[in-house]
Amino acid sequence: MDAVKDKLYELIQVVKDSPEYQNFEKYKYELNMNYDLRRRVDDYRRICYSMQQSGEDLYDKSDDLAREFSDLFANSTSHEFLMAESSVCRMIREICIALSREIDVDITL
């Protein structure tokens, strides 16, 4: 188990050193300099998460959400933060999928 933990911490460091994560940290810092914008982004993220977890058809709701939060995508800081966050999440998801597939443990719910 110690060898696995060592490699895990190596992987964590590789992720943290990646351009995707560095970009995410940069925009997170910039976003945190503007409390109101950060709060608005967090509201958007919270609603997106709730919608994804609901299991409902998201097509119409996505359009409504995009209109309601269009200011976030017009603002370069919030837009870049959301894109960077998405990139890091995609990387983490790919790591989890690869681990699950290669270790052959069915954890599908």
Image (cartoon, rainbow, N blue to C red):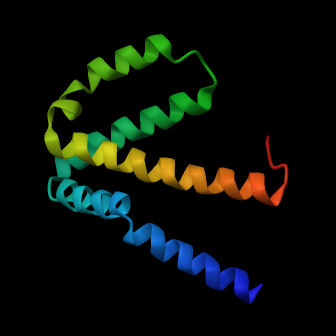
Percent coordinates x, y for residue 50 in the rendering: 52, 33
Residue found at x 32% / y 43%:
82
The residue lying furthest to the bottom in this view is 2
Percent coordinates x, y for residue 8 in the rendering: 62, 76
Residue found at x 18% / y 29%:
71
For the image shown, how many numbered marks are present on the structure?
0
| Camera-side residue of 71 and 39 | 71
Percent coordinates x, y for residue 43 in the rendering: 35, 39
| Camera-side residue of 55 and 9 | 9
The residue lying furthest to the front in this view is 102
The residue lying furthest to the top in this view is 60
Image check: 95 left or right of 45? right
Image check: 59 left or right of 71? right
Residue 50, above or below 13 = above
Percent coordinates x, y for residue 47 in the rendering: 43, 33
Residue 78, above or below 69 = below
Q: Quadrant of residue 66?
A: top left
Q: What quarter of the picture does the N terminus occupy? A: bottom right
Residue found at x 71% / y 80%:
4
Q: What quarter of the picture does the C terminus occupy? A: top right
Residue 50, above or below 27 = above
Residue 5, above or below 65 = below
Q: Quadrant of residue 70?
A: top left
Q: Quadrant of residue 25?
A: bottom left
